[in-house]
Amino acid sequence: MGLSRSAAGKAVTRLEERLGARLLNRTTRTLSLTDEGRVFYDHGLQILTSVDEAEASIAGQSGVPRGVLRLAVPDVFGPLVGLPLLDKYLRTWPDVQVEVSLTDRPAELLDNGFDVAIGFGATPSAADSRLITRVIGSDKVLLCASPSYLAERGVPREIADLAAHDCLFFTSRGQRQAWRFRSGGGWIKAQGRSRLRLDSGQAVRDAALAGLGIALLPDFLIAADLTAGRLRQVLPDLETDDTKIVALYSDKGVLEPRVRCFIDLLLEEIGGQGQGLRGLTPQPYQNRESS
């Protein structure tokens, strides 16, 4: 928005005074929409959508991406892999601006006005039937823990040993991440003690690094930690269930050029390699001017 929090707050206050209605419930920690605020937000979103569609209609005649691309990406994807992708996208299409929200709940696409959401194994709920799910690629997931945790609690030798360990589970919308492993020609679910659940993949990694338990994480996220010895792979001979990398977007019939070109870039950079994020193991991002 180009506004500080203070300026944005004053702008909302002026709007409330002009409308004669309170739009936000304010506490010391959170903000939430009032009923009047929800009505105003929904109407405003419709206006923005109409403007976007008008821009897309005009831009679609020339096929040149324009306007604002609104993205929702997982916190682990954004800083590590998303920045190089966005760098290439912005340099290729200079008439597009990008707004990024880091979230591990990509299915909230329609409610928040996003154009595209990236998710890991995410599928739309029944209420989001207007969403299209496009599989971009897949990535291996690995069991891992810190050396300090394994030294204190012991190293699991088989799946059943996980029941005696603290396991760090990712949760989304109240649903706990399923740990599935191939055994005897089929898939079994591992049972571990779930003393800590987190709704952020990055937070799960941080908890594993802190020695709080065993985690199941994408290999692109922990590759550097494994190499440096900050984490150790647990039960390395187990075959795990790959996680799908998906793009979610609204089923409008015709994709705006900026959305279509971004999805094409995802397919080219991730899916086109046939190995998902394994071919994009993240390195510290460097600005072109400093490289």
Image (spheres, rainbow, N blue to C red):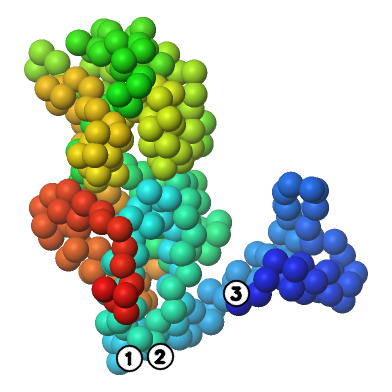
Mark 1 surroundings within 10 Å by alpha-carbon count, few (fewer than 14), some (14 through 19), many (20 or more)? few
The quarter of the image holding the C terminus is: bottom left
Q: Is residue 250 visible?
A: no
Q: What amino acid type is highlighted by mark number 3?
A: Met
Q: Nearer the viewer, mark 3 or mark 2?
A: 3
- How crowded is the residue under tag 3: few (<14 C-alpha within 10 Å), some, or many (20+)? few
Q: Are marks 1 and 2 in contact (CB under 8 Å)?
A: yes
Query: Disc 3 versus disc 1: distance between alpha carbons?
Result: 28 Å
The amino acid type of the residue labelled 1 equals Gln
Say if 212 sits above or below 262 in the image.
Answer: above
The nearer-to-camera label among 3 and 1 is: 3
Q: CA distance from mark 1 to mark 2?
A: 6 Å
Q: Which residue is mark 1?
A: 61
Dots 3 and 2: beta carbons under 8 Å? no
> Where's residue 71, x and y in %?
43, 64
Q: Earlier in the sequence, mark 3 or mark 1?
A: 3
Q: Residue at x 80, y 48 (%)?
A: 27
Write down the residue under mark 3.
1
Q: Dot 2, how many residues are within 10 Å of its Cα: few (below 14), some (14-19), or many (20+)?
A: some
**187 or 200: nearer the viewer:** 200
Q: Nearer the viewer, residue 225 or 160?
A: 225
Q: Secondary structure at mark 3?
A: loop
Q: Position of residue 130 (x, y in %)?
A: 42, 56
Left or right: 29, with 194 as reference point: right
Q: Quadrant of the N terminus?
A: bottom right
Q: Position of residue 217 (x, y in %)?
A: 30, 35
Residue 244's quadrant in the figure?
Answer: top left
Residue at the spot of label 2: 58
Alpha-carbon span between mark 3 and mark 2 = 24 Å
Kindly state the secondary structure of the residue where label 2 is placed.
helix
* Residue kind at label 2, given as amino acid type: Ile
Q: Tag 2 or tag 3, which sits nearer the N-term?
A: 3
